[in-house]
Image (spheres, grey):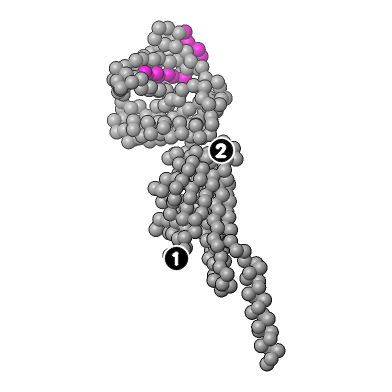
């Protein structure tokens, strides 16, 4: 009996010593993932509370596996997150680290002080491990969400090669926002000029509308053709580098949807540090005079990049 008691005491003593030796005074929780996305776009998503609901794994936002998460003060590449379990709060830091123009590392770090009480020390250790597992799971959801450009910019964006390299174009200044009749009139003039020169249209009409000031607009239309045509006072040949890089987006909707999509396409270009050798434009898939319901318009947006 005495030997059993001694063995029990030694076992307890060993466990107590192990708790102090194996569990540090401060528990560090660290998890890291790689995301295929540009740092500025990721920063816009993760520093915006309302964007978290798009990828959060629970129906109850900012609550996961018995813990609550609250965003603190944020900077461009650092998100401070307070993790609360009903009793204690762990202050954590999510850092966005640039790898290159289209990929980053997300490093999520936290610390929690343990206790001199061995039983409480072990309890804190178990809780820290659970917190670290939660961090790993949440980072996995973040990665799955951010690896898709449409979740950051609102639609899929593809980098493709320029196919149509020879264009005939027309430019017009207007003292009002161009309507569909204004644009169609320019397109029909281009088509007439193409036919007069026995050339062939190679693709659908292109459109760029630039707002000069509160009332004035510059409108440019173009049609890809099979060969270069003579310049006139009204019509000008334009050339694009065949095989060059160009960003492509297809959207459905009217003028507001198109304008919003161009803003996000510009964000994508800047986020990925592309320069542009030419102006962006719309490719008019839908005949807008025949289809008056703007919600049914199909448009492709293009942005030449280097």
Q: 10 Å neighbourhood of mark 2: few (<14), some, or many (≥20)?
A: some
User: Is the residue 196 above or below the residue 248 in the image?
Assistant: above
Report the side of 96 relative to 212 (left or right): right
Q: Residue furthest bottom?
A: 1
User: Is the residue 3 above or below the residue 193 in the image?
Assistant: below
Q: Which residues are magenta?
A: 218-230
Quarter of the image where one finds residue 20: bottom right
Residue at point 35%, 27% (across, down): 287
Report the side of 189 relative to 55 (left or right): left
Residue at point 50%, 35% (across, down): 271
Q: 10 Å neighbourhood of mark 1: few (<14), some, or many (≥20)?
A: few
Q: Which residue is mark 2?
A: 102
Q: Earlier in the sequence, mark 1 or mark 2?
A: 1
Q: Position of residue 223 (x, y in %)?
A: 44, 19
Q: Which mark is residue 260?
A: none
Q: Which residue is mark 1?
A: 87
User: Could you tell me how many numbered marks the image carries?
Assistant: 2
Q: Pick whichever, 147 or 184, lies toward us.
A: 147
User: Is the residue 62 above or below the residue 47 in the image?
Assistant: below
* Mark 1 and mark 2: Cα distance apart in space: 40 Å
Quarter of the image where one finds residue 123: bottom right
Q: Position of residue 154 (x, y in %)?
A: 43, 40
> Of helix, strand and loop, which one carries label 1?
loop
């Amino acid at each position: 009996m005495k030997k059993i008691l001694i063995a029990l005491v030694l076992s307890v003593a060993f466990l107590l010593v192990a708790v102090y030796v194996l569990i540090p005074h401060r528990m560090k929780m660290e998890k890291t993932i790689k995301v295929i996305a540009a740092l500025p776009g990721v920063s816009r998503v993760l520093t915006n509370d309302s964007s978290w609901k798009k990828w959060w794994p629970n129906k109850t936002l900012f609550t996961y596996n018995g813990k609550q998460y609250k965003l603190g003060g944020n900077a461009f590449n650092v998100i401070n997150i307070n993790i609360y379990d009903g009793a204690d709060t762990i202050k954590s830091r999510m850092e966005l680290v640039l790898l290159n123009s289209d990929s980053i590392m997300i490093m999520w770090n936290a610390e929690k002080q343990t206790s001199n009480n061995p039983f409480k020390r072990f309890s804190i250790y178990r809780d820290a491990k659970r917190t670290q597992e939660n961090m790993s799971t949440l980072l996995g959801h973040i990665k799955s969400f951010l690896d898709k450009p449409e979740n950051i910019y609102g639609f899929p964006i593809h980098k493709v090669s320029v196919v149509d390299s020879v264009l005939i174009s027309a430019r017009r200044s207007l003292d009002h926002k161009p309507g569909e009749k204004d644009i169609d009139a320019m397109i029909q003039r281009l088509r007439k000029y193409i036919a007069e020169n026995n050339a062939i249209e190679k693709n659908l009409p292109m459109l760029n509308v630039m707002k000069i000031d509160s009332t004035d607009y510059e409108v440019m239309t173009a049609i890809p053709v099979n060969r270069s045509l003579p310049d006139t006072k009204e019509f000008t040949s334009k050339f694009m580098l065949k095989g060059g890089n160009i960003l492509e987006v297809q959207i459905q909707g009217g003028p507001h949807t198109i304008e919003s999509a161009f803003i996000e396409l510009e964000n994508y270009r800047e986020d990925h540090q592309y320069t542009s050798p030419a102006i962006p434009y719309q490719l008019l898939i839908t005949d807008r005079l025949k289809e008056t319901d703007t919600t049914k318009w199909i448009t492709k947006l293009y942005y030449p990049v280097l």
